[in-house]
């Protein structure tokens, strides 16, 4: 493991995953590895009972690959490409296993990944799990869902998500997922980090239950409470508002600059 600090900033992590109040099983998966500065959240879908197999394959494959191959931390663009390769490898692994047994046939998963560098974060995703950044009290969604509802909005058929829902467009149709074919298109970006930023990686079991402005308020309270308190609050409110789906989140707080 690295002796040098991964980042110019002190970093704090928190993660939670919960079955929610309706589903019998938790098919989400989450992994945070502070030693390697990596966060992964996945939401398993489809298959008979293999959604959790797919989501865990995604988090484990990505984490293992990170541990054997040191990320080029000085080079954001190189790191972004390594993260994309790693997600492609997870995709192949899930896709192959889905072909090998009947019980895993059709399994797939969303994935969101964050990998910290010196003064930046690489973010990457496939599917409708999301990445948000809180900065100066503003919550910004950094990812765009790979879902049918997002697509019809982007194509101009509806002005807002609420309009599309009123028209009967379902929210659960993914246009991209890991494991559904041998090749996958990944969305990725390099994001500069500033002291005070809070990054949220989460599944739709959180965003479908908790309005953005509530998430913003809870994440803003991190300044006075702890990151763990914010993680607990987000989970609790998602459950209080119905907990219709598995709820999973990972938080990364960019603290003060480390003293040289
Ligand atoms: Mn979900």
Image (cartoon, rainbow, N blue to C red):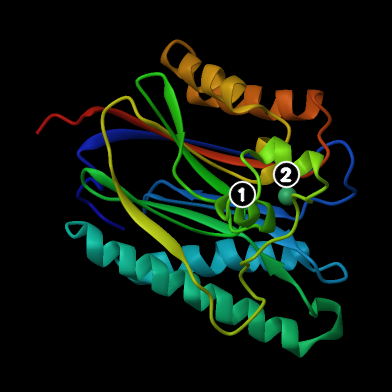
Choose between 53 and 140: the one closer to the eye.
140
Q: Is residue 218 above or below residue 64?
A: above
Residue at which label 2 appears: 164
Residue 120: x and y, percent? 26, 46
Identify the residue shown where x is 59% and y is 80%: 93
Residue 199: x and y, percent? 44, 36
Q: Is residue 180 above or below residue 73?
A: below
Q: Is residue 43 above or below residue 246?
A: below
Identify the residue shown where x is 19% and y is 39%: 8
| Quadrant holding the C terminus | top left
Identify the residue shown where x is 61% and y is 49%: 153
Q: Extreme left residue here?
A: 260
- Find the distance from the CA under tag 2 to the CA under tag 1: 7 Å
Q: How many marks?
A: 2
User: Residue 174 is drawn in which quadrant?
Assistant: bottom right
Q: Secondary structure at mark 2?
A: helix
Q: Is ligand 1 less than 8 Å from the beta carbon at label 1?
A: no
Q: Is residue 151 left or right of residue 118?
A: right
Answer whether labels 2 and 1 touch (C-beta < 8 Å): yes
Residue 226: x and y, percent? 49, 19
Q: Secondary structure at mark 1?
A: helix
Instruction: Report the disc number at residue 222.
Output: none
Identify the residue shown where x is 65% and y is 57%: 147
Badge 2 density bin: few <14, some 14–19, many ≥20, Cα 10 Å: some
Badge 1 density bin: few <14, some 14–19, many ≥20, Cα 10 Å: some
Q: Extreme front residue here?
A: 157
Q: Is residue 129 left or right of residue 225?
A: right
Going from the N terminus, do you reach mark 2 or mark 1 first? 1
Residue 107: x and y, percent? 75, 72
């Amino acid at each position: 493991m690295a002796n040098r600090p991964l980042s110019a900033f002190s970093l704090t992590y928190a993660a939670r995953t919960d079955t929610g109040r309706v589903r019998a099983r938790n098919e989400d998966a989450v992994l945070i590895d502070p030693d390697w500065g990596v966060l992964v959240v996945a939401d398993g879908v489809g298959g008979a009972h293999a959604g959790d197999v797919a989501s865990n394959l995604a988090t484990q494959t990505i984490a293992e690959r990170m541990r054997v191959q040191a990320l080029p931390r000085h080079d954001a663009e190189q790191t972004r490409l390594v993260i994309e390769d790693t997600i492609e490898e997870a995709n192949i692994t899930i896709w192959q296993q889905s072909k090998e047994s009947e019980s895993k046939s059709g399994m797939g998963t969303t994935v969101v990944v964050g990998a910290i560098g010196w003064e930046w974060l690489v973010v990457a995703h496939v599917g409708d799990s999301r990445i948000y950044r809180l900065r100066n009290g503003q919550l910004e969604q950094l990812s765009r869902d790979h879902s049918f509802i997002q697509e019809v909005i982007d194509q101009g058929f509806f002005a807002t998500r609420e309009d599309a829902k009123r028209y009967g467009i379902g929210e659960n149709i993914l246009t991209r997922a890991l494991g559904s074919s041998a090749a996958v298109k990944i969305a990725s970006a390099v994001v500069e980090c500033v002291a005070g930023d809070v990054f949220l990686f989460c599944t739709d079991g959180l965003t479908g239950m908790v309005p953005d402005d509530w998430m913003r308020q809870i994440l803003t309270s991190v300044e006075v409470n702890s990151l763990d308190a914010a993680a607990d609050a987000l989970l609790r409110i998602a459950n209080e508002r119905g907990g219709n789906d598995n709820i999973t989140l990972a938080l990364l707080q960019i603290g003060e600059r480390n003293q040289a």
